[in-house]
Image: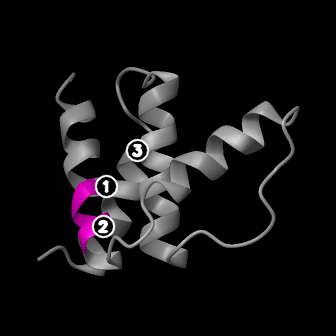
Amino acid sequence: MTSEAEFDAAVTRAKSLPKRPSDEQLLELYGLYKQATAGDVHGEEPGFFDFVGRAKYDAWARRKGMSAQEARRAYVALVDQLAAGG
């Protein structure tokens, strides 16, 4: 079980990773973070020409139905992997 403190520590670590994550990894981090902190995706889906907004919305929407605990655990695991150079 991943505690709030472990999750918060991973969020802080994610801001100072040794290497910048790829765009796909950043979107995965974003989607997991939003699912962990705000639950299932809500709000208007961004328009077709809002590429960044749409990518972020889609990354969050892929996590629909995932529990906050599961999203926190996956987020911490991904940050650990990225911190180790993966």
Q: Do callouts 2 and 1 mark residues in contact (Cβ within 8 Å)?
A: yes
Location of residue 43 in the rendering, given as x and y in whole percent from the top left corner: 76, 71
Q: Which is nearer the N-term, disc 3 or disc 2? A: 3
Magenta segment includes 73: yes
- Residue visible at 59% across and 68% down? 41
Magenta segment includes 37: no
State the residue position of label 3.
14
SS at badge 1: helix
Location of residue 33 in the rendering, given as x and y in whole percent from the top left corner: 46, 60
Q: Which amino acid does label 3 sit on?
A: Ala
- Quarter-wise, where is residue 12 in the image? bottom left
From this view, report whether residue 5 is shown above or below residue 18. Answer: below
Left or right of residue 26, residue 74 in this image: left
Q: What residue type is labelled 1?
A: Tyr
Quadrant position of the N terminus in the picture: bottom left
Colour theme:
one colour
- Quarter-wise, where is residue 38 in the image? bottom right
> Which SS does the magenta portion mostly show?
helix
SS at badge 3: helix
Q: What residue type is labelled 2?
A: Arg
Nearer the observer, 69 or 58: 58
Q: Distance between the residues labelled 3 and 2?
A: 13 Å
Q: Do callouts 1 and 3 mark residues in contact (Cβ within 8 Å)?
A: no
State the residue position of label 1.
75
Q: Distance between the residues labelled 2 and 1?
A: 5 Å
